[in-house]
Image (cartoon, helix red, strand yellow):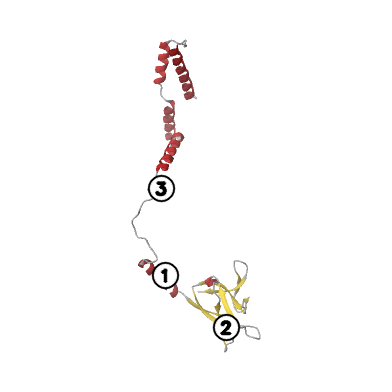
Amino acid sequence: MFMNMIRNNRKDLDSSLINTREGTSSMPQTELSTQENAFDAAIDVADVSRAWAQEYYRLFDKNFIDKELVQQMVGQIQQDYKKLKEQELFTKEEGRVFSNSDKTLKNFERILAHAKRSNLRLHKFVYRSTRLLQPRQVAVSGSFDERKEKHKLKFNHFSKVWNFTLKLLPGEYYYKFYVDGEWICTDDDLKDNDIYGNINNFVIIQ
């Protein structure tokens, strides 16, 4: 408010000076000069207010943030950012880039694959038919390979059962038998519902 009063008085003074030069002002020249010198010697109250605010915040262990100064800095940063060229935003860094052909990466993959193979467990899937006639074809599919493949079981004429051995990592797996085009769960193994609510056989590999 005080600054607005000063600005308004300054405008009145400028108007009076103009009128004096044109010979239309009634204010004496000495009085106009005195007012002009007084305004020129005045201190900007904004700086004084800012200094008092900083001291007040300091007494309470706080930091005073000048919003006008922040806005000016943000505007300047935005202008500087626009002036930057796109290629100046990226710099080259020296170092090693790994690729599929890198020997270190290949060795690591071989070690990891060997560790997985050494942790594999053999599991035999067995299906016993309750029908009078044996099915023509039996396969098993499960979550151990995300059901991507139907693994065919072999029929043992002596034991009269179908079986297939698969290497699996430790864990829990859902599976079903595919018997002559029909998905079947056997009662000889454990059963449980998967996340979709479908009933499956399941096995725990330790």
Q: Circle 3: is it few (<14), some (14-19), or many (20+) Cα within 10 Å?
A: few
Task: Report x, y in % for residue 82.
Answer: 42, 42
Question: Image point 40% across, 47% down: which residue?
Answer: 86
Mark nearest the camera among 1 and 3 is 3
Up the image or down, 133 lies above or below 147; here it is below
Residue situated in front as seen by the camera: 128 or 49 = 128
Mark 2 or mark 1: whose residue is earlier in sequence: 1
Q: Are marks 3 and 2 in contact (CB under 8 Å)?
A: no
Task: Report x, y in % for residue 10.
Answer: 45, 20
The kind of secondary structure element at disc 3 is helix
The kind of secondary structure element at disc 2 is strand
Up the image or down, 57 lies above or below 118; here it is above
Give how far apart the Cα atoms at labels 2 and 1 are: 34 Å
Up the image or down, 49 lies above or below 87; here it is above
Q: Circle 1: is it few (<14), some (14-19), or many (20+) Cα within 10 Å?
A: few
Using the image, tell me which numbered label, if any, was put on residue 162: 2
Task: Report x, y in % for residue 126.
Answer: 57, 81
Residue 62 in view of the camera: no
Question: Image point 45% across, 36% down: which residue?
Answer: 71
Please, what is the three-letter code of the amino acid marked with disc 2?
Answer: Trp
- 128 vs 15, left or right, is right
Residue at the disc numbered 1: 112
Where, by quadrant of the figure, is residue 99 drawn? bottom left
Using the image, tell me which numbered label, if any, was put on residue 86: 3
